[in-house]
Amino acid sequence: MRLRLDAKTVSALDLGAKNEEIVWDTALPRFGLRMQRRHSDGTVLKRFIVQYRVPGGRKPRLTIGPAETLGVEQARRKAREALAKVDLGQDPQADKRDRRDKDKLSLRSQIEEYLAFKKGEVRAKTLTEITRYLTGPYLKPLHTVALDMIGRKDVAARLLATQRERGNIVAKKARDTLSAFYVWAMEQGLVGANPVVGTTKLKNGKPSDRVLDDNEIAALWRACGDDDYGKIIRLLILTGCRRQEIGGMRWSEFDNPDNPTAWTLPAERSKNGKAHKLPLVPMTTKIISTVPKMVNRDQLFGTRADAGFASWDRGKTALDGRSGVTNWTPHDIRRSVATKMADLGVLPHIIEQVLNHQSGHRAGPAGIYNKSSYEREVRAALALWEDHVRTLVEGGERKIVPMRQVP
């Protein structure tokens, strides 16, 4: 059937007893309205189409859109655009299939492929950082977008938002990580360009020198909930460890998982690649005892990530709101512990031993010949620090007298 398609005729057309029919437009050859009866309920579906011929004799049929939402003139205009491509030797249907295939290659889906590729190339800690920046909140709005549809403007907008919310250092790391991902994607033939190129190059900025005062430490401690993040922050305050060291803590790292007295950070999880043993003070073991053991899971914290706890940003935002302490990072706790231990009279080389630093007294000839772990002194320093923290959060007097440094 052929007739001029307009709003009136499209609305009036019906299948009658038929199940399918195409009505061709007399105003624009190869443009028509396809009517089909849906078997489930008998509803007649109307869709605008274009049919054309390509080399080899095939006659592909391209769906323009449903008549319920697309006006006739709008559909006819889209049909003209498609037919113009045909006249130039292109195949709109093939372009549509190609676009559909590319849309399946979302940023999120290919991040999984990239992480699997990197797993065999980098250290576990590096992989954790890559995962954090690619799957975290920084790029999340782009996760559902096809790789080739993410442009420089999209990346620049996410980096600017990250810079405002998380600071310059985090934004720079997010930029560097995403750029490395797109280099890999180009090597795999998934995209033709890296949208990070041309965006503002961010600098690391000045290292933080933030030291929390006693009131802030007490406020953070009291605001910590009984969740994983709250327990991790309290353990950071008591030990001065790095956040990933505590966040990735495993039951198998304790001397006795049921009643631990010491914890050994293995070399593969240590920043300097050296195992580090710490005695556990009572407040530390009390926190650990509240962590439920999960079947078939060695990590104390987190539920799915192999590296342990992963919800750092969400946990910190909530803690900031409850504590009233702002402008701090978990690493500032480590600096604060070291500084305040020194204020309590703990000698510098003992503080370095607590922190597992390989600089200072461990550097040069002294570090080559002196292999002492200062276990007794480290235990005394941690006990002194525990007593200080207990006094801050509970009030009362100190039970342990601060150390006196010999001049």
Image (cartoon, grey):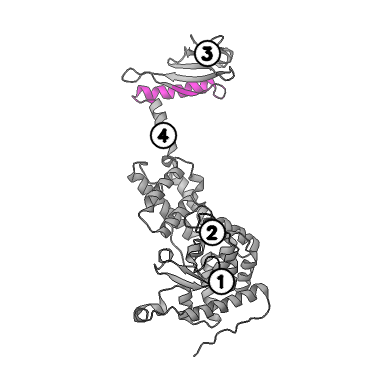
Q: Is residue 53 above or below residue 263?
A: above
Foreground of the two, 259 or 375: 259
Residue at position x 59%, y 84% in the image: 401
Residue corresponding to mark 2: 301
* Marks 2 and 1, the one that precedes in the sequence: 1
Q: Circle 2 — which element?
A: loop
Q: Quadrant of residue 110?
A: top left
Q: Nearer the viewer, mark 1 or mark 3?
A: 1
Q: Is residue 10 above or below residue 150?
A: above
**Mark 3: few/some/many CA within 10 Å (<14, 14-19, 20+):** few
Q: Nearer the viewer, mark 2 or mark 1?
A: 2
Tag 4: residue type? Asp
Number of numbered discs overlaid on the protein picture: 4
Tag 2: residue type? Phe
Residue corresponding to mark 3: 19
- The disc placed on residue 114 is none
Would residue 244 be visible to someone looking at this image?
no
* Marks 1 and 4, the one that precedes in the sequence: 4
Q: Circle 1 — which element?
A: helix
Q: Position of residue 281 (x, y in %)?
A: 56, 74
* Marks 4 and 2, the one that precedes in the sequence: 4
- The disc placed on residue 101 is 4
Task: Report the Cα–Cα distance between label 4 and label 2.
Answer: 39 Å
Part of the protein shown in magenta? 62-91
Q: Circle 4 — which element?
A: helix
